[in-house]
């Protein structure tokens, strides 16, 4: 990939990385502070309401934004139609949530969640108002502007939720979510100006729905399994145990979501634009896979290794049951990284149905295991069910990738093996230090030293064994290569 297109991809990844690092950093700080200020039951009640909102949003999602991104030429009528469909959908979802709140709370065996759900039902409406022109920024890889939207929302949510935590309890989480959504809407119109028009033009909407239906089906299957998991935990174990699981998933899947957003939001338009050149697609896929695993594997190995000390020294004693959950879910997130890079590949090459099929197989396996493993092992059982489902799914993702590309994993095994070695050495150092140095300061020292050691070892391996990590960055994302001063010979 050369020239202006390569520079665009490089710029996009730089700004996407800045955006994700900042938003995930704010999320991490917010979570740690709120874990000290709120009880597990507060997180559990919020998780019930958030799960219900997410479920109804997903089963009505028509994939308007991805369809606009994938479409080669989107006209004004397409944007107006997509925004109009989004607004009508949000109105319907909010109305259903308000009316069904008592029934949903009863299903989760937690009547206190009904009032929370009625208030949180305003969030779909707030989000739907946002400028639909952000889809144009996504297609053109203009992540500098997009970063402002997510950063503003994350910052406002963090400030509001923490400011009111001691006085409002669980309602601080609700207030933060609503305030953050409103901030994102305002900034979306600043970075992507658009004059909303309620226009329902069937000629403009139908092509978008034809593509978006596969995004819709994928999301329905995924959210169904996630919602059922939380429902089973709530009914069998209660809101407090659900709060432990909710926090564990947020922490353990934070790196996983990072990979999803980088691979999906940057790689999807990238693959869509180069889909006619399969050799270039294969090269880009391998580069994104190696780059994703190189950055996230050390994070996951540290997370899994240090989870017990993290819970003890950072979260506090009332979250003691979260450690094993973080470890199992962290392993599940690590296992799933390959599939997350495959998803934008399948969609970008015009095969979104395979994403649906694989998600359905994965979720079906999780659901089949769920009730029995939760009864036997508690919330950890739910995590084990997801680990099993994701593990089987990765094998199937490989076979589909092998059908689309000649050699999807050619040349990736040696760099990944050596990155794994460096990650394990760094984690071993962190575990040893965490047993010598007590408290939060000791934990921070252990994590930072392990990160430095891992980074140095990866650099040494890259130079000594000619892994090509620098070459991947230089050829695929030249702006990043220049940013970190990758030498021509690496």
Image (cartoon, rainbow, N blue to C red):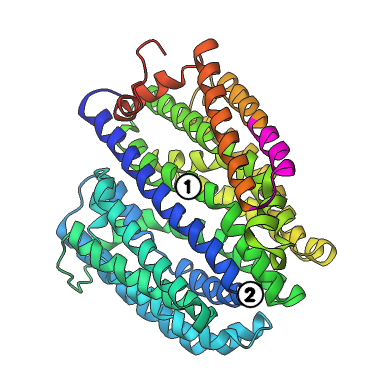
Q: Quadrant of residue 480?
A: top left
Image position of 320 with respect to 332: above or below: below
In the displayed structure image, the side of residue 49 where residue 182 appears, left or right: left
Tell me whether the residue at label 2 lies in contact with that at label 1, contact meaning CB atoms closer than 8 angstroms: no
Q: Which mark is residue 258?
A: 1
Q: Which residues are magenta?
A: 426-439
Residue 131 in view of the camera: no
In the displayed structure image, the side of residue 243 where residue 455 appears, left or right: left
Which residue shows up at 56% across the image and 39% down it?
Answer: 448
Image position of 62 with respect to 394: above or below: below
Question: Is residue 187 or residue 373 the one in the foreground?
Answer: 187
Which residue shows up at 42% across the image and 24% down it?
Answer: 283
Image position of 355 with respect to 275: above or below: below
Q: Which mark is residue 39?
A: 2
Coordinates of residue 163 in the picture (x, y in percent): 43, 74
In the displayed structure image, the side of residue 349 where residue 392 appears, left or right: right
User: Within 10 angstroms of label 2, few (less than 14), some, or many (20 or more) residues?
Assistant: some
Whether the magenta-drawn stretch holds residue 432 is answered as yes
User: Within 10 angstroms of label 1, few (less than 14), some, or many (20 or more) residues?
Assistant: some
């Amino acid at each position: 990939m050369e020239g202006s297109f390569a520079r665009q991809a490089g710029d996009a990844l730089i700004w996407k990385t800045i955006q994700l690092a900042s938003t995930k950093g704010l999320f991490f700080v917010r979570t740690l502070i709120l874990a000290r200020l709120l009880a597990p039951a507060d997180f559990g009640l919020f998780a019930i309401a958030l799960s219900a909102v997410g479920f109804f949003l997903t089963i009505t999602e028509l994939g308007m934004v991805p369809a606009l991104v994938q479409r080669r030429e989107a006209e004004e009528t397409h944007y107006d139609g997509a925004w109009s469909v989004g607004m009508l959908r949000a109105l319907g979802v909010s109305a259903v949530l308000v009316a069904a709140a008592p029934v949903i709370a009863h299903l989760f065996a937690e009547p206190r969640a009904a009032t929370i759900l009625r208030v949180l039902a305003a969030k779909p409406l707030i989000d739907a108002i946002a400028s639909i022109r952000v889809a144009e920024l996504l297609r053109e890889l203009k992540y500098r502007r997009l970063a402002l939207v997510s950063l503003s929302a994350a910052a406002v949510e963090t400030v509001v939720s923490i400011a009111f935590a001691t006085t409002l309890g669980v309602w601080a989480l609700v207030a933060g979510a609503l305030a953050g959504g409103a901030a994102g809407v305002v900034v979306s119109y600043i970075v992507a100006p658009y004059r909303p028009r309620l226009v329902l033009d069937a000629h403009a909407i139908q092509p978008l729905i034809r593509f978006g239906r596969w995004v819709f089906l994928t999301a329905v299957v995924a959210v169904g399994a996630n919602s059922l998991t939380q429902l089973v935990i709530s009914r069998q174990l209660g809101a407090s145990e659900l709060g432990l699981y909710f926090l564990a998933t947020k922490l353990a899947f934070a790196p996983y979501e990072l990979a999803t957003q980088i691979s999906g939001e940057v790689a999807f338009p990238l693959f869509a634009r180069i889909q006619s050149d399969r050799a270039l697609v294969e090269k880009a896929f391998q580069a994104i896979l190696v780059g994703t695993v190189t950055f996230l594997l050390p994070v996951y190995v540290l997370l899994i290794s240090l989870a017990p000390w993290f819970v003890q020294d950072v979260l506090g004693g009332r979250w003691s049951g979260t450690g094993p959950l973080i470890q199992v879910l962290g392993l599940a997130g690590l296992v799933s990284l390959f599939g997350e890079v495959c998803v934008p590949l399948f969609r970008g090459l015009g095969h979104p149905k395979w994403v649906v099929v694989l998600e359905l197989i994965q979720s079906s396996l999780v659901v089949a295991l769920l009730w029995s493993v939760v009864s036997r092992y508690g919330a950890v059982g739910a995590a084990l069910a997801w680990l099993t489902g994701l593990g089987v799914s990765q094998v199937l993702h490989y076979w589909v990738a092998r059908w689309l590309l000649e050699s999807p994993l050619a040349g990736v095994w040696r760099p990944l093996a050596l990155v794994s070695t460096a990650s394990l050495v760094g984690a071993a150092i962190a575990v040893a230090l965490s047993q010598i140095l007590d408290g939060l300061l000791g934990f921070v020292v252990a994590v930072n030293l392990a990160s430095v050691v891992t980074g140095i070892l990866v650099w040494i391996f890259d130079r000594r064994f000619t892994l090509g990590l620098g070459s991947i960055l230089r050829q695929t994302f030249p702006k990043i290569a220049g940013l970190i001063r990758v030498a021509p010979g690496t």
